[in-house]
Image (cartoon, rainbow, N blue to C red):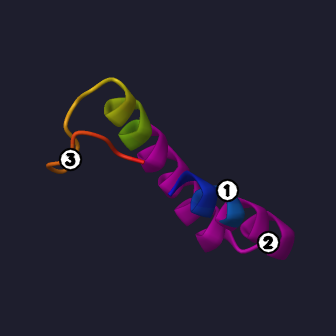
């Protein structure tokens, strides 16, 4: 999810499409939160680990 967000950020920056930029930021933030929760041992969406 983080990688997809970064790709959308780059594509949105190159093409000057603000919607891709916004979606990319949201995906990066949500992916980072899920990654941190999963790495600390909290169950995320019923899974013990989130990759």
Question: What is the crowding at mark 3: few (fewer than 14 residues within 10 Å), some, or many (at least 20)?
Answer: few
Q: Mark 2, mark 1: which one is toward the viewer?
A: 1
Image check: 7 left or right of 43?
Answer: right
**24 vs 45: above or below:** below
Prevailing secondary structure of the magenta residues: helix
Farthest-out residue, right: 14
Q: Secondary structure at mark 3?
A: loop
Image check: 51 left or right of 21?
Answer: left
On the image, numbered disc 1 is attached to which residue?
A: 6
- 22 part of magenta stretch: yes
On the image, numbered disc 2 is attached to which residue?
A: 16
Rendered location of residue 46, percent (x, y): 14, 49
Magenta-tinted stretch: 8-32
**4 vs 44: above or below:** below
Q: Secondary structure at mark 2?
A: loop
On the image, numbered disc 3 is attached to which residue?
A: 47
């Amino acid at each position: 999810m983080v990688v997809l967000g970064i790709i959308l950020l780059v594509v949105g920056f190159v093409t000057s499409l603000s919607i891709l930029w916004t979606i990319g930021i949201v995906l990066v933030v949500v992916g980072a939160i899920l990654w941190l929760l999963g790495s600390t041992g909290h169950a995320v969406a019923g899974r013990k680990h989130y990759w």
